[in-house]
Image: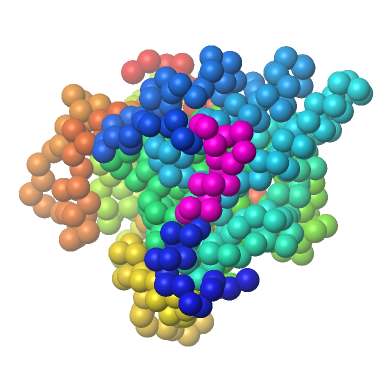
Amino acid sequence: MSAQPQETWQEIAARKQSALCKKLFKDGWQSMRLTFETERPLAGNILPMINSCEHLSPRDIEITEAQDATELLSKIHSGQWPAREVLVAFYKRALVAHRFVNCLMDADLDAALNRAQELDNYLRTTGNVVGPLHGLPVSIKDLTDVKGLNYSMGYVSWADNVSADDAVVVETLRKAGAVIYLKTTMPQTGMALETFSRLWGRTLNPHNVGLVAGGSSGGEGALIASRGSLLGMGTDSGGSIRIPAAYNGLYSIKPTSRRVSYRGNNNNASGLGVSSSIGPMAHSLRDLKLAMKTLIDDSHWLKDPMIIHKPWDYQAKSPAKLRIGVLMSDGLTTPHPPIQRALQATIAKLTAAGHQVVTLEHVKLHMDSDTMTRRVYGQVGSGYMLDEFKKTGEPPIDAIKHRLGWETMSLEEMIQVQISMNYTAIFNILDYPAVTIPTTFVDKTIDRKITRDTFLNAHDKENWEMYDPEVFHGMPVVLQLVGLPSMDGQLLEVAAKIDDINHRIKG
């Protein structure tokens, strides 16, 4: 369904935002909207404000503050917490979070309540669960099809698009007992590292609402960090799972693209040369492992010819002694002081635990990351984006203006530039699985800004001068661990060992 041609893009956006508010707070939830008088602060951590919100009962807080989805599931499966009560608690918390960080773009509460009640009845009458995710509320990113709900990719011209069917991943989640209840925001076109669109507005970071939530799975990142969901699905074509996970202090995995079906996700174009993945974002590595096992155990190779026939490796183990390569810099952009501290601390802890750490030298490239991004990612639908903007007169957001009008190139030229050492996109091009591991927080008393006289390039200078320990104090510091293609299970096992060492060994 296309947007009404007589409306301006501003009118369409206002209509959709008003309709979303009415849908989120409809019926018995309307009084919550009317009495919600807390104003969004301009900066600072709003997580304590969520926990003290009058609309959340002590029971709601207890449920939503479960350590992770795995612990929550144990409570549901034992009958301690009914799935319907759990759903209501997370929905209420999601509404509170949304008022602070603007992370939602659609909801399916009536169907979710019915499904949760069915699951409670089934458990009560049979003593069994329908699957490993029985009763777990799971949130889904905008571009992923959920039958009957909107998808927009942040385009005003897509404002009234409704999915006719579930994506393969959503089918699997439902089959495993998950309760699909919310869809979350993403940036206009999906090609930005912050989550802002003319249609839905800007999504903020709950650790500091003066900062952004990352992109393009920024709505998922902000919602899960706010504990309005404990497990959600993001997508990643250049860092779109890992970047919001890093900004919001979450565990996540960008799987090998051919392990989990991407069918049912909407894109600008085919994505020639760039492997897109769909994967979980959560509060623990064991949640990532549970989600990945659930998805792969559903034999996506029988539903999607792009998926390799490779069952989950239940015997995957981390080697007793690890040999980890560490890249301190890509030679193009110097990491900020908190990242350097986290890397150095992790190296010290791994070494103290008897593991081998090898410092990797960056590969000298004939082309910097900006040029690679401009020429490879610019092929992915820049003409399509312009066509969509023309339909409503919607202007592109600042974050993607530079992507439009890039020169096109032949397949042979594209192959020549598909190497970059930027910190995320290279692993989409290589199709290596990658995990994010929360490690520490920015500490302004330790992570002081260092004056530099020389820089690697103009972008390195700009990036370094952006760092302000006063502004970033208290923000999560997250590292990325990369593995070999299709060895997603072993990567999670190694990540679990590193995570344990990081939290067990002081220093």
Above or below for 2 versus 469: below
Q: Measuring 63% from the left and 71% from the top, which residue is drawn there? A: 1
The quadrant holding residue 367 is bottom left
Residue in the picture at 11% in, 52% down: 454
| Residue 481 in view here | no
Q: Position of residue 444 (x, y in %)?
A: 20, 28
Helix, strand or loop for the magenta stretch, by majority: helix
Q: What stretch is highlighted in magenta?
A: 17-32
356 is within the stretch colored magenta: no
Q: How is the rendered protein coloured?
A: rainbow
Counting from the top left corner in percent of width and height, residue 152 is at 54, 62
Camera-nearest residue between 83 and 324: 83
From the viewer's perspective, tell me whether residue 431 is left or right of residue 114: left
Comparing 82 with 495, the one in front is 82
Q: Which of the two residues, 177 or 310, is positioned nearer the viewer here?
A: 177
Question: Residue 288's quadrant in the figure?
Answer: top right
Most extreme residue toward the right is: 126
Q: Where is residue 117 in the image (x, y as percent from the top left)?
A: 78, 31
Image coordinates for residue 26, horizontal then vertical, percent = 59, 41
Image quarter of residue 87: top right
